[in-house]
Image: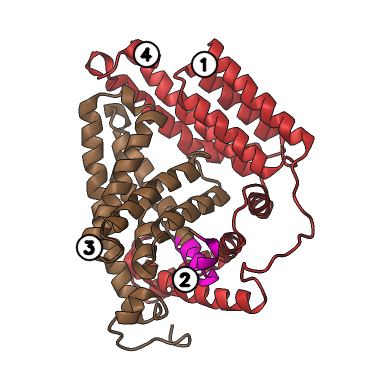
Amino acid sequence: MRTLNPAVKFVTLLAVTLILAGKHDPILNFAVFLLSMAAILSAQVKPRTLGLLLLPILLAAAGMFFTGYRFHAGGSMPVRAEILNIGSSALWNGLTQASRVLAYAGAGYLFALTTDRVRMICSFQRQFHLPQVFAYGLLAAWGIFPQMTREYRRTRAAFRARGIRVFPISPALLKPLLVKSVRWSEALAIAMESKGFSGQAKRTDFAPIRVQPRDWLFLLLTVGCTAAAAVLL
Amino acid sequence: MKASKWELKDVIMMAILGVVFAAVYLAVFQGGLALSTALTPAGLSAFGFEIIYGVWFMASTLAAYIIRKPGVALITEILAAAVELLMGNSGSLTVVLTGLIQGAGAELAFAIFRYKKWNLLSMSLAGILSALFIFCYELYYLNYISLAPSLLIAQLAVRFISAVVFSGIICKLAGDGLAKTGVVKSYAIGAKADVGKVYDEEDA
């Protein structure tokens, strides 16, 4: 999982998600969710990390279950239920809604937890022809993120030192952060441009990221199996 | 749209705004989650997120308000989505797709005004169109079409209000506030702004 080409992995999982979006089958959704979990755990992600990430998803799924259960469109729907392949019962509707949240999140985490960020951007730049200037911009913004959290904590501590209680997302905390961010972005842009990262010049990569046969195999197998299951079920 | 038109300065600015608002969104998301969990037994859990949905559209409207170039709203929203992908978004991979759709909505609003009007009206419209675009997509993607129409209309109404409050009113205030501090002098918004005292790095 970790060594697959990020761009190909992205396309594959996106395709799986979109196939699932067109299909309303809780069994298929649950299967995708479980397979993603298995793949994540086999990529040596700590179960604890995964568990913490899943907690909000499970809550959201429960929420969607009851929304689907209580407010299923049934007869009041403008289109016929059989066309959309939606079960008539409220329970089935609730299960479909809930399992969908799980399946989407499963595919999303599978990508997020097993992909190296910098490699992903390099791969997008090469395989999706993402313009260089955007790749640099993204990497720069990503690199500045830790500094932002530090700044936020510092402002918060400053308020606390003065004995003022502020809400975690109050404007008093966010305004200095926004001003600093603008300053950083300017300083960073000047620094990068002065060192040749302007995005205009062509450059070579130290370790170019290529698409290998096994990436294609992963793409074809995964999308093929999902599509087949979607048709058959 | 040629890539060479974009200066690194603009791109970094857009991406950083994306990071800031992705972080804000994550913070607000926890609140939304608590709220929607409370609403779960009533089957109204989706409303918890509808209320904060407008935060999604903030990055693109604020960036457009500051930089004021065609395409800024669209690209900022995509970059913000890409940043979220980097952070490990819980939604799913389609976050880039949703970014594209929301950005297109916001971009359309500014294009209607021919990129000449940068005020509360155009920014609110940007928020509303983003909300509308993404709602149409969710009808299919989140299978909302299988929910009762009355619930959907209520959801959409709450989302519109949220969009106007966050990406219209709050973004306008934030943009004007930034212009007043003088840090955005080199962007379109700051060129005309009435700058009082320009703060220096040492004062900050």
The chain containing the residue under callout 1 comes to: A
Q: Amino acid at mark 3?
A: Leu
Residue occupied by mark 2: A181
Image: A202 above or below B81: below
- Identify the residue shown where x is 38% and y is 24%: A65
> Residue A27, which numbered label?
1
Disc 4 marks which amino acid?
Ile
Give the numbered dot on residue B120. 3
Instruction: Give the letter of the chain under mark 3.
Output: B
- State whether residue B29 is above or below residue A84: below
Q: Colour of chain B?
A: brown
**In terms of sequence position, does the residue under pointer 2 or pointer 4 come before the other?**
4
Magenta range: B2-17
- Comparing labels 3 and 2, the label whose residue is closer to the camera: 3
From the viewer's side, name the closer residue of B132 and B59.
Answer: B132
Chain A hue? red
Q: Which numbered dot is residue B97? A: none
Residue located at (25% from left, 36% from top): B155
Circle 2 residues within 10 Å: few <14, some 14–19, many ≥20: many
Q: Is there one chain holding both mark 1 and mark 4?
A: yes
Residue B90, percent across and down? 50, 41
- Tag 2, which secondary structure? helix
Name the residue beneath numbered marker 4.
A83
A112 sits left or right of A221 in the view: left
Distance between mark 2 and mark 4 Cα atoms: 50 Å
**Separation of marks 1 and 3 at Cα, in angstroms:** 47 Å
Q: Quadrant of residue B204?
A: bottom left
Residues under numbered marks 2 and 4 in contact, where contact means CB atoms less than 8 Å apart? no
